[in-house]
């Protein structure tokens, strides 16, 4: 009976290799998004630099979602940029891709940018539930 069991193992392994496993095996990754004066919200940088195509991660759609909401405090018209702008943090789930996202919104003074402030967002993205809550306890 031992030889029957050994012979069955490679068959199971072979069958498993050809099956698609859901959820898809993915690792954590980082996306930097910013507001481009010419293109609107963009994601100029991901870590790793080339995300696997089978992850089906749409960086453009993600940048729009992350930067689409106004997260900065409104300033009085004609006021100068301030270096004392408070940063914001946000966590949310992306149910369609089963991802959990931590966003750190900040901006820097940039006289070439709209409103003299360049907004960008550092995002940490993981497929592991509850991982962000464990890492980023306030």
Image (tube, grey):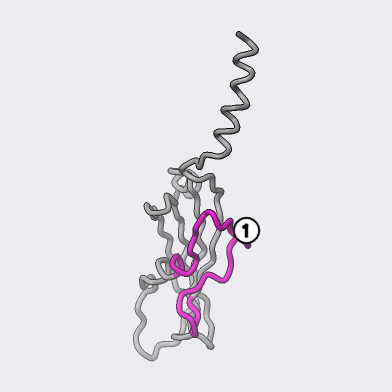
Residue for point 46% across, 86% down: 114
Q: Tell me the element at label 1.
A: loop
Q: Nearer the viewer, residue 128 or 10?
A: 10
- Residue at the far top in the pictured view: 1
Q: Position of residue 123 (x, y in %)?
A: 50, 60
51 inside magenta stretch: yes
Residue 43 vertical position relative to residue 127 in the rendered view, above or below: below
Q: Position of residue 10 (x, y in %)?
A: 63, 26
Q: Position of residue 113 (x, y in %)?
A: 50, 85
Magenta region, residue range: 35-63
Q: Is residue 68 left or right of residue 16?
A: left
Residue placed under numbered mark 1 in the picture: 48
Q: Position of residue 50 (x, y in %)?
A: 62, 61
Local crowd size for mark 1, using a 10 Å CA cut-off: few (<14), some (14–19), many (≥20): few
Residue for point 58% across, 63% down: 46
Q: Quadrant of residue 5?
A: top right
Q: Nearer the viewer, residue 62 or 6?
A: 6
Residue for point 35% across, 89% down: 77
Q: How many marks?
A: 1
Residue for point 41% across, 55% down: 91
116 inside magenta stretch: no
């Amino acid at each position: 009976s031992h030889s029957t069991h050994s012979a069955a193992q490679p068959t199971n392994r072979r069958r498993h290799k050809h099956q698609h496993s859901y959820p898809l095996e993915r690792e954590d990754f980082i996306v930097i998004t910013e507001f481009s004066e010419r293109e609107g919200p963009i994601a100029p940088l991901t870590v790793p630099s080339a995300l696997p195509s089978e992850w089906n991660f749409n960086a453009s759609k993600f940048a729009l979602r992350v930067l689409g909401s106004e997260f900065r405090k409104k300033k009085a018209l004609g006021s100068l940029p301030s270096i004392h702008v408070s940063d914001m943090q946000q966590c949310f789930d992306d149910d369609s891709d089963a991802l959990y996202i931590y966003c750190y919104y900040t901006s820097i003074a940039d006289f070439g940018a709209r409103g003299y402030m360049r907004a960008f967002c550092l995002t940490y993205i993981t497929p592991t539930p509850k991982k962000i809550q464990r890492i980023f306890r306030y």
